[in-house]
Image (spheres, helix red, strand yellow):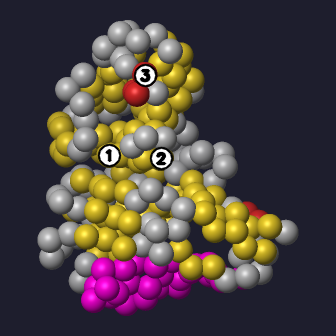
Amino acid sequence: AQKVTQAQTEISVVEKEDVTLDCVYETRDTTYYLFWYKQPPSGELVFLIRRNSFDEQNEISGRYSWNFQKSTSSFNFTITASQVVDSAVYFCALYNAGKSTFGDGTTLTVKP
Amino acid sequence: DSGVTQTPKHLITATGQRVTLRCSPRSGDLSVYWYQQSLDQGLQFLIQYYNGEERAKGNILERFSAQQFPDLHSELNLSSLELGDSALYFCASSAGGGLANNEQFFGPGTRLTVL
């Protein structure tokens, strides 16, 4: 069975702080994909990133960066210099054989 | 605006009833995915259709069914509704047959309330 754990239910930071959202996954498969999604207060889900299990290279996109470590089955997401607009629920997901398994989400609140 | 449309936005119904949720994918996208987001179950993948055929099945109840029509829009049918079916139902689309190489775009969701 596949499982995704986002241990942080809620995180609150002040604007310009850096914040890391943790994601730990479980799977017996060797080929899989990991995703991060953002759900802002408006409710619509937005795809942020996909990483396949064979590519452990970290990725940076503007203020966002992702750290994938197979050895610890983790795929963490860091927002640098957070902004109020980053306030949202963030979901980590594991995709394999056509099916997605989601974590429970982390609610990030960025205060001005 | 993702280009994925869902109707209706809100739906209120009673236990035991049947409802149909509709999704129109982005122009050119062949895959449609359905998800349920509830307080109890969190975010769950229900089912995927690709070019009219069922492609992948997740945690979809037997009381639920879906189909994708020749014009590529999709409908999710929920029957014998229970209180626990109250949730936000998302539709998403992608150009290809899966998420390994395709970006996914989500609709705004349909909020179903079962009383």
| Stretch in magenta | A55-81
N-terminal-most mark, 2 or 1: 1
- Relative side of B71 to A87, left or right: left
| Residue for badge 1 | B45
| Residue for badge 2 | B106
Give the amino acid type for the residue marked by disc 3 in the picture. Answer: Leu
- Badges 3 and 1: C-beta atoms under 8 Å apart? no
The residues tagged by marks 3 and 2 sit, at their Cα atoms, a distance apart of 25 Å
Above or below, A100 relative to B37: below
Question: How dense is the environment of label 3, judged by Cα within 10 Å: few (below 14), some, or many (20 and up)?
Answer: few
Closer to the camera in the image, B9 or B62: B62
- Find residue B110 and report its horizontal and vertical position in percent: 51, 30
Above or below, A71 relative to B55: below
Q: Have a look at marks 2 and 1 and say if they share a chain.
A: yes
Asked if residue B37 is among those painted magenta in the image, a careful observer would answer no
The residues tagged by marks 2 and 1 sit, at their Cα atoms, a distance apart of 13 Å
Closer to the camera in the image, B76 or B113: B113
Extreme left residue here? Answer: A29
Quarter-of-image position of residue A108: bottom right
- Find residue B64 and report its horizontal and vertical position in percent: 27, 25
Closer to the camera in the image, B71 or B79: B79
Residue at 46 percent across and 51 percent down: it is: B105
- Badges 2 and 1: C-beta atoms under 8 Å apart? no
Q: Is residue A73 visible?
A: yes
SS for dot 3: helix
- Badges 3 and 2: C-beta atoms under 8 Å apart? no
Question: How dense is the environment of label 2, judged by Cα within 10 Å: few (below 14), some, or many (20 and up)?
Answer: many
Residue at 40 percent across and 59 percent down: it is: A103
Q: Is residue B67 visible?
A: no
Could you tell me which chain the residue with mark 2 belongs to?
B
